[in-house]
Amino acid sequence: MAAARPLTVLAISTLLACGSESSAGDTPVAGDAGTTASSSGGSSSSSSSSGGSTASSGALPGGGDDAGVAPGSCPGLRDDFSAPSLDTTTWRTIGFMGWTPEIVDARLTFTPKAGYANTRTGLVRSAKSFALTGCSVSVEVARALPAGMSGEVNVSLGVAGALVRARQGTLSFAMTVDDAPKTASIPYDPAAHRFWRFREAAGVLYLETAPEGRTWTERLQGPHGANLGDVQLGMNVIDTSISGVFDAPQFDNVNVVP
């Protein structure tokens, strides 16, 4: 199979805005920590790949410890954002206009600047690349944009067209398979879909959600055909509504189970 040409986040976002190929609307199935339930009704499997990478030991950038490390998570990237400011050895801020990236209540917060009357954009990306092979990377989306606003919160890998986004009450999933985009979408439930995860196993990329970072439901999967040995996690917020006062979008617990 020829290597897939990765789509940019902008290109895949445009595709998602035009509609999706399929819907994966099943509610996550309860189970033990680390269990994955297929949204298509398939068999359940462990989210930790045997023989794959495991989380490395040591303190979290935010000051936590290994007690909350997500099972099966990729080594080299973890943060609970409990430090008073964003750890610049772990994260880079890119293209911020109209937002202030800061730590508020131990969460990465995109605070809207007062009086800013234009499109707000901003990306926080992992400062170092990591290998998403036989492991996973997860993010808690503690607060997205209100459903009525024209904008989105998304998390991406920067390769394989891999993207999860919440936009106007819809949660969308995308990746590139055999040089073509593959997408799915479901109605967004901020509580049921609070955690988003990218997982790789045996050449297949899985996009999954969980309510508490433990019981995962598969939303989209496919053979990625891309080099996932060098990826960077990105957390992005775009607001095109030029809105007034609203609760700031927040991320938390990267590869950490609270």
Image (tube, grey):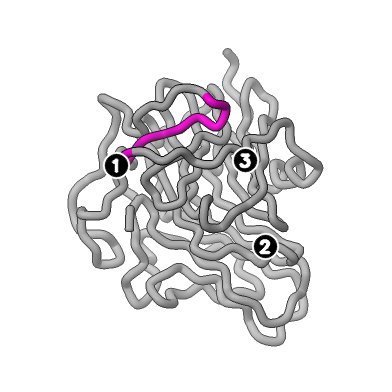
Q: Which residue is mark 2?
A: 238
122, above or below 212, in the image = below
* Residue at left offset 20%, top offset 54%: 67
Tell me what residue is drawn at x 34 percent, y 77 percent. 84
Say which amino acid is labelled 1: Pro
In front here: 166 or 204?
Answer: 166
**Mark 2 vs 1: CB contact within 8 A:** no
Secondary structure under the numbered disc 1 in the rendered image = loop
Q: Amino acid at mark 2?
A: Ile
Assess whether residue 40 is covered by the magenta stretch.
yes
Image coords of residue 25 (percent x, y)? 62, 39
For the question of whether residue 225 can be seen, the reply is no
Bounds of the magenta span?
A: 32-41
Cα distance in 3D space between marks 2 and 1: 31 Å
At a point 34% along the width and 59% down the height, the residue shown is 79
Query: Does the magenta-highlighted stretch encompass residue 61?
Result: no
> CA gap, disc 3 to disc 1?
22 Å
Give coordinates of residue 16: x percent, y percent: 73, 43
| Mark 3 → mark 2, Cα distance in angstroms | 17 Å
- State the mark number for residue 71: 1
Residue on which disc 3 sits: 173
